[in-house]
Amino acid sequence: MNIYKFLSDYEKGQILVIHSQELSKLEIGRQLSRHHGTIAKYLKNLSDPIPKKSPGRKNKLTSRHESRIFRAIGTGNNNYQNKRAIRVEYQSRDY
C-alpha cells in the first residue's frame, strides 16, 4: 500500500511557475499543501535527472585466479583435490 501521493503534471507546472518567481521551497509547499521536501526533491531531480550508479562491490578474485580455480575443479576427480586447489589459490593472493 503506497501512502505517497505523487505530484500531478499540474502541480509540477505550478512548482516551476512559483519557483521562477523566486519563492522558497517552503513557501511553494505551503501554497500547494505539499511538504517542502517533496518540492526540493522535484526541483533537484530536474537539474540532475539521471541518478549516479555506484560501481558496486569489487571482486575479491581476479579473473586469473577465478579461471585457475575453475580449471582445478574441472580436472580434479575428488572433492579433496578440489578443496586443496581452492585453498592454495585463495591463500596465495595478496590482500
Image (cartoon, rainbow, N blue to C red):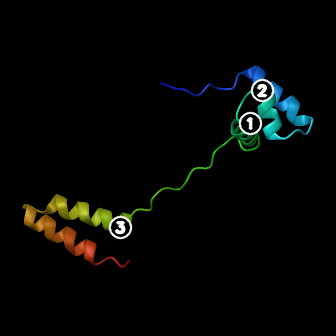
Report the front residue among 83 and 24: 24
Q: Quadrant of residue 42?
A: top right
Residue type for callout 3: Arg
- Quadrant including the C terminus: bottom left
- C-beta proximity under 8 Å, tags 2 and 1: yes
Total marks shown come to: 3
Q: Quadrant of residue 41?
A: top right
- Can you identify the residue that label 2 sits on? 32
Residue type for callout 2: Leu
Q: Residue furthest right?
A: 21
Report the front residue among 72 and 22: 22
Real-space CA distance between mark 2 and mark 3, rounded to the nearest whole angstrom: 59 Å
Q: Residues within 10 Å of mark 3 (few under 14, many from 20)?
A: few
Q: Secondary structure at mark 3?
A: helix
Which residue lies at the image location 21% right of the left edge and 75% below the top edge? 88
Nearer the observer, disc 2 or disc 1?
2
Q: Position of residue 53 (x, y in %)?
A: 57, 50
Q: Position of residue 63 (x, y in %)?
A: 37, 63
- Can you identify the residue that label 3 sits on? 64
> Mark 3 or mark 2, which is nearer the start of the sequence?
2
- Can you identify the residue that label 1 sits on? 39
Q: Position of residue 79 (x, y in %)?
A: 9, 61
Residue type for callout 1: Ile
Real-space CA distance between mark 2 and mark 1, rounded to the nearest whole angstrom: 10 Å
**Vertical placement of residue 67 versus 94, above or below:** above
- In the rendered structure, the answer to whether residue 9 lies left or right of residue 56 reads right
Q: Residues within 10 Å of mark 2 (few under 14, many from 20)?
A: few
Nearer the observer, disc 2 or disc 3?
2
Real-space CA distance between mark 3 and mark 1, rounded to the nearest whole angstrom: 50 Å
Which residue lies at the image location 69% right of the left edge and 26% below the top edge? 7
Q: Secondary structure at mark 1?
A: helix
Q: Position of residue 57 (x, y in %)?
A: 45, 59
